[in-house]
Image (cartoon, helix red, strand yellow):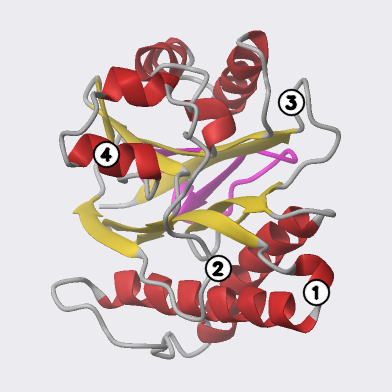
Amino acid sequence: MSYSLQVAGKSDVGCVRTNNEDNLGFDTRLGLFVVCDGMGGQAAGEVASKMAVDSILEYFRQAQPSGEFPQVGPAADGYSRHANALASAVRVANQAIHDAAEANHKRKGMGSTIVMVLVHDEFISIAHVGDSRIYLVRQGVMQQLTNDHSLVMEQVRRGLITREQAEKSEVQNIILRALGSEAAVQPDLDDLMAQPGDVLLLATDGLTKLVPDERMHGIIAANADSVERTADELIQAAKDAGGDDNITCILLRIVRQPWYQRWFKIGGGKVQWQNSI
């Protein structure tokens, strides 16, 4: 089976903030997609999120010629070598951010969330740290693939508050795990089979805390022919809801590739590509 990827990514400063601490990056040749949300004063959040994206892309680009992924930290049992490669890349990024913060007191405490997707063969591997999210839309159903590493969601998991109470909590911005905050970090990992028609949404909380899941699902379903338009409408929905944070998302649709396109490299535009996997 041969699939193609249709991808669009967009980041917006929002309606309140003056600088954008979010960053995104992807490499369709590698099937790699990354979204980060930085934190820290004096523009340190922007530095942390950019360092995270750059470190992740560099790790996989260096590994591409040989196809061998250097193992950093302990391998996680029960996950593919691609998921473990994501974990290794996360640890590389974490160390870079942590070291940079330690070396410059003005960047003390800077950090970043991260969500990552790696599409390989006919599989999808994911990794995340923090409260940015990955959603999967498959056969008309949307599900959240990640669990927020946040105080309120930990309270929800323990049955201390309801999800509705969490959405109104004044401490939604407190996260329990982030890149750079500690010398070591453990990302959550997962592997799943890819299916034609799958749509993956990677997003920072500037989108997910303002636009309910049902609304995001409706926007994705209504724009099945254009991931670029879907990204634009998701960003606008968050801005219409107040846009009090930076807003970033990547939309990735997996489609069955016609046989006559398998011999050609297909691409175009600044934010939308279609490549074979």
Q: Pick whichever, 50 or 19, lies toward us.
A: 19
Task: Give the mark nearer the N terminus: 3 vs 2.
Answer: 3
* Residue 69 colored in magenta in the image: no
Quarter the C terminus occupies: bottom left
Give the image quarter of residue 246: top right
Q: Residue at x 36, y 48 (%)?
A: 3
The disc placed on residue 74 is none
* Residue 14 numbered mark, or none: 3
Q: CA distance from mark 3 to mark 2?
A: 25 Å
Q: Residues within 10 Å of mark 4 (few under 14, many from 20)?
A: some
- Compared with 65, 201 (above or below) is above
Please report contact status of discs 3 and 4: CB closer than 8 Å, yes or no: no
How many neighbours does mark 3 have within 10 angstroms: few (below 14), some (14-19), or many (20 or more)?
A: many
Mark 4–mark 2 Cα distance, whole angstroms, equals: 21 Å
Circle on res. 105: 1
The reply, left or right, for residue 110 in relation to residue 73 is right
Which residue in the protein does label 4 denote? 155
Which mark is nearer the camera, 3 or 1?
A: 1
Which residue is denoted by mark 2 in the rendering?
181
Identified by mark 1, the residue type is His
State how far apart marks 3 and 1 are (Cα): 28 Å
Q: CA distance from mark 1 to mark 4?
A: 33 Å
Choose the circle earlier in sequence order: 4 or 2: 4
